[in-house]
Image (tube, rainbow, N blue to C red):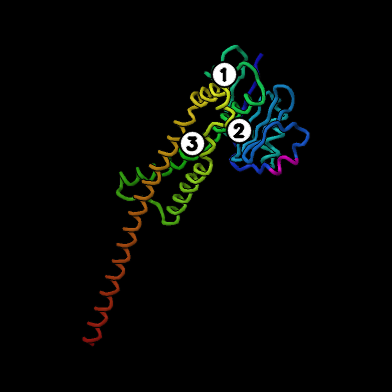
Amino acid sequence: MHLKAIAYHLEKRILLSNIREQFKSYNLVKREHSFLLYKIKNNTYIYLKDYGSVVFINCDDKVIQQTVSFLTKKETNMSNLPSEKYKITFSDTIEVDFGNIQIKELNDDVAHITMLNLAQSVALMNYVNKTSDLHDKTLVYSKQLEKTGSFKLSKTQMRKFIGRTMNLKNNIAENLFVFDSPDVAWNNKDLSNLDYKLKDELDIVKRHQGIENSLNVIKENLDLFNDILQHKYSSMLEWIIIILILFELVQVIVEKLI
């Protein structure tokens, strides 16, 4: 027997207060200000995290599609969303490896730990995609600078790049607590073991550090580009002033000659 676990990131925050009103038919087994865990039936769960992740265990495709479409307020192509898929199997030992999560039993706490880690992982995937997009775009201007000694980037475009980078860093910082383990994992050996193995398999900490390092590199590149632009515009202003002075001198000399 095995169950399907799948996580999606909606690339937008979820207002959990509104969701509770709409999901009254489901059994709410766990809740905090940042998440809701619903039990639909035996071994079937839906987990909602406020930063935009939704995780399903043993839910059919219709329920998944309806839930995601409701949360996004539109008909959504699931293949376009960042996703993580795992198979849950049952055994006497706990293991996480190669797309498989092996557990002893599935209860509310095990579901919570499993779905939280998948929610974290798919959120990181979304951040990785956005960081890679920013890095690729700054790389274009770095190559232009290497080849020509200049780059085609206006001050407005520069400000937008810096704004996107800072907003991404702020979004990650806002959700840093996400990467902590829940209290329930510290009180039970099996739950703690499952949490550790999930984080290790999903590379939660390393991927987060990689995103932070990439954003720092992007920010350094943008700061350098900004300095070059500032110098370019300062030089332009200096030349404008010199030309105006020369124009005044020529005008004075012409008036004296006349």
At label 3, the amino acid type is: Val
**Quarter of the image where one finds residue 101:** top right
Q: Dot 2: few (<14), some (14–19), or many (≥20) neighbours within 10 Å?
A: many
Q: CA distance from mark 3 to mark 1?
A: 23 Å
**Quarter of the image where one finds residue 83:** top right
Q: Which residue corresponds to mark 3?
A: 128
SS at circle 3 = helix
Asked if 234 appears above or below 17 in the picture, the reply is below
Q: Is residue 155 left or right of residue 180?
A: left
Q: Is residue 113 left or right of residue 225?
A: right
In the rendered image, residue 17, in percent from the top left (x then y), is placed at: 69, 43
SS at circle 1 = strand
Asked if 6 appears above or below 245 in the picture, the reply is above
Front position in the image: 184 or 153: 184
Query: Where does the magenta region start and end?
Result: 17-21
Q: Which mark is residue 100?
A: 1
**Residue at 38% across, 51% down:** 152
Q: Is residue 37 left or right of residue 168?
A: right
**Residue at 46% across, 48% down:** 166
In the rendered image, residue 200, in percent from the top left (x then y), is placed at: 48, 24
